[in-house]
Image: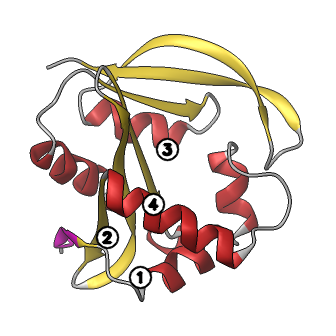
Amino acid sequence: MALDVTLREVRPDDLDLFFTQFQDPEAKRMAAFGPAGPVDRARFDAHWKRNIAEYVVRTVLADSEAVGSVCVYGEPGDLQVTYWIGRAHWGRGVATAALRALLEVVPERPLFARAAADNTGSVRVLEKCGFTVTGRERGFANARGVEIDELVLTLTG
């Protein structure tokens, strides 16, 4: 049976879920790029409140349960997509469905995304949503403590 994946505006209590998900060491390792060291809750909340005020940020629901977030952020001409789905929901098509829904909300193109080159799940989600690899960079991945390859993906249509 297929999951019903929808988006809604972020509610204040969603930040509790997002913060908890961000503490998952395996999810952080896969995402690779993020803040160094432990995450301070006050800074986390301030960051999220600023993002919610400035960008297109949505809570992802799978069968009416909040399971993560999707966002388009940045400046016109350099808009980036990002998403975070709780690990318990990986491999179920949630990220793909959520990103497709977000792309309907945000018509601007091009859109860009970045993913650790070895994060095949995330790269596959982006490709299924029409993004193509347009570049490769190296950067320091705080969650891994080393420099790694990162793919740059672009959606033009």
The quarter of the rendered structure image containing the N terminus is bottom left
Residue closer to the observer: 27 or 110? 110
Q: Which residue is mark 4?
A: 50
Q: Residue at x 62, y 69 (%)?
A: 44
Q: Which is in the foreground here, disc 4 or disc 2?
A: 4
The residue carrying mark 1 is 14
Residue that badge 3 annotates = 121
Using residue 127 as the reference point, say whether residue 153 is left or right of it: right
Q: Quadrant of residue 133?
A: top left
Q: Are marks 1 and 2 in contact (CB under 8 Å)?
A: yes
Amino acid type for the residue under numbered disc 1? Asp
Q: Is residue 19 left or right of residue 86?
A: right
Residue 19 percent coordinates (x, y)? 59, 76
Numbered tag placed on residue 150 in the rendering: none
For marks 1 and 2, give the CA distance: 7 Å
Left or right of 8? Residue 28 is right
Considering depth in this image, is 143 or 2 the residue closer to the camera?
143
Quadrant for residue 26, please give it. Answer: bottom right
